[in-house]
Image (cartoon, grey):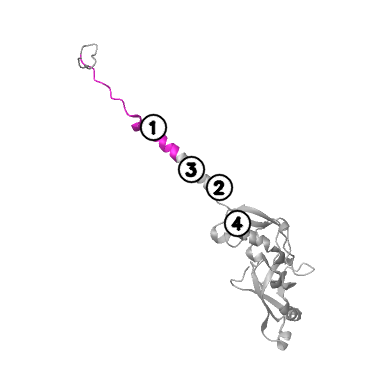
Amino acid sequence: MSAMSPPESSSGAPRAARLRRRRWSDPRVLVGAVVVAASVAGVTTLVTRADDTVAVWATSAAVRAGEPVDVGQLRAVRVRLDDDTGARYVTAEGAASDRFVAGLGDRVWTRSLTGGELVAAGALAAQADAVEAEVPVRVERGALPDDLATGDRVDVWVSAQDAAAATDAPGARRVASASRVLDVGGDGGALGDATATTVLLAVDDTALEDLLGAMGGARVTLVRVPGAGA
């Protein structure tokens, strides 16, 4: 059998065989593969981020401080929170959530919340630990922190309102410690006195009598307690 000879051109000269480029080394194929891989990675990232949420409890309607907590006042919502922020709210996932719901029969709200507000860990407490009275305190502007908010804790100090009274009761004294702020209201007087505001405080029963007795005719100052917020 004779060996195959290279094909000849029309001029009679042997024609060189054309080498076929391997498909995997084609630049267009490589570029396409890179585009597909990038697309898949992008979709995966989006799906992962979309599911980067945690379930926490929120109120289904407005609640008031001192009311018993009922499971019907709660609903689970999924929100995106970082670890530090998420730790401040009551989880609605897993065994921890089951224990929370099972223990609601002994809980009361320690602050008023609006509907849809996330439930912070300090927003409820065992009823035995929440023996407090709600006391509205009229405070002059400048005698409380400008950014005082619900959930803050304050010491209540009273001092003489004028020089004559100061002669009989010199200096200032603390009449309540670490009282929880339930609400920071509007005008402090019936005529809309813009120089004062009304702050609703949760005051321990043991300090209530002293506070009410000292408030008459005295200047009240609220001092926020660092690190004692709920």
Mark 1 or mark 2, earlier in chain? 1
Measure how far apart labels 3 and 1 are at the Cα level. Answer: 20 Å
- Choose mark 4 or mark 1, whichever is in front: 4
Q: Are marks 4 and 1 in contact (CB under 8 Å)?
A: no
Measure how far apart labels 2 and 3 are at the Cα level. Answer: 12 Å
Label 3: which residue?
42
Is residue 195 in view from this perspective?
A: no
Q: Do the residues labelled 4 and 3 touch (CB within 8 Å)?
A: no
Measure how far apart labels 4 and 2 are at the Cα level. Answer: 20 Å
Mark 4 or mark 3, earlier in chain? 3
Label 1: element kind? helix
Give amino acid for label 3: Gly
Residue 21: say if magenta. Answer: yes
Question: x%, y% of residue 190?
Answer: 79, 68
Instruction: Write the residue at 67% across / 60% down.
Output: 101
Give amino acid for label 1: Val
Mark 3 or mark 1, earlier in chain? 1
Mark 4 or mark 1, earlier in chain? 1
Part of the protein shown in magenta? 13-37
Measure how far apart labels 4 and 3 are at the Cα level. Answer: 30 Å
Q: In this view of the protein, which residue sits in the foreground, 182 or 215?
A: 182
Measure how far apart labels 4 and 1 are at the Cα level. Answer: 48 Å
